[in-house]
Amino acid sequence: MRRLTEKRLLVATHNAGKLDEMRALFAPHGVEVVGAAEMGLGEPVETEDSFIGNARIKARAAVEATGLPALADDSGIAIEGLDGAPGVHTADWAETGAGRDFMQAMTRAWSELEARGVPEPRRAAFHATFVLMWPDGHEEIFEGIAHGRLVWPVRGALGHGYDPMFMPDGHDRTYAEMTADEKNAISHRADAFRKLQAVLG
């Protein structure tokens, strides 16, 4: 496994909430995190049907555009009662003509569970896949997961995405009712990051 010795890392995301989480996770290791938007990068089209495939597309585009090592994260929520949907289409469910609306996405998820008559508890898992890529094309892959159940109505005003409807196993609050530090200690992204720490030099 290659170690990351560089002290500047491009995180290939335009999601401010996700970028904040990554900065907090990398800060203790002395790694400066710069986001794709700060570098003026566009968002590549994600054409793969897996988290790894889409993360790889984003990492490769970022490396080629900047020459910096890049970390791309593709993540999403897989709902058991919806056959794993939305999965890689997690953000797509939030798309509107005026940007992303995750209340719309969460409402769709719950409505489809209702339409199918899926019994409680309505199980789901957040997945996070990191692809860390260097300018020479070498990559390391790290996958994290957090299991839990969905709640309705949504709860909490913190977090982002589907956080207000996801209650992780072993807890009585949703991601969106937790502080950033509390969520970062148990999240799917934190699980992937714990594995990634093995490469931090």
Image (cartoon, grey):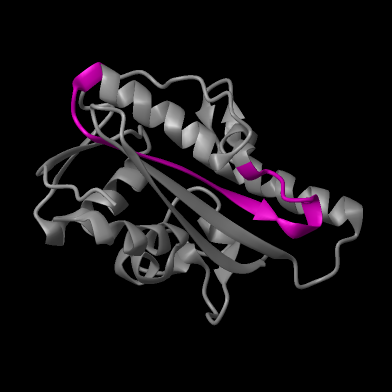
Q: Residue 33's spot in the image, x, y percent?
A: 18, 42
Depth order, front residue of 158/30: 30
Residue 109 horizontal side relative to residue 5, left or right: right
Q: Residue 64's spot in the image, x, y percent?
A: 28, 19
Depth order, front residue of 99/91: 91
Q: Is residue 165 above or below residue 36?
A: below
Q: Is residue 40 visible?
A: no
Q: Residue 180's spot in the image, x, y percent?
A: 33, 63
Q: Is residue 2 above or below residue 165?
A: above
Residue drawn at point x = 45 percent, y = 27 percent? 57
The quadrant of the picture occupied by the C terminus is bottom left
Q: Is residue 111 visible?
A: yes
Residue drawn at point x = 81 percent, y = 48 percent? 112
Residue drawn at point x = 36 percent, y = 46 percent? 18
Depth order, front residue of 17/87: 87
Which residue sits furthest front? Answer: 1
Residue 20 horizontal side relative to residue 129, left or right: left
Q: Quadrant of residue 94?
A: top right
Residue 49 horizontal side relative to residue 172, left or right: right
Residue 79 in magenta stretch: yes
Residue 160 in magenta stretch: no
Residue drawn at point x = 70 percent, y = 55 percent? 79
Magenta part of the protein: which range? Answer: 65-87
Q: Residue 86's spot in the image, x, y percent?
A: 68, 43
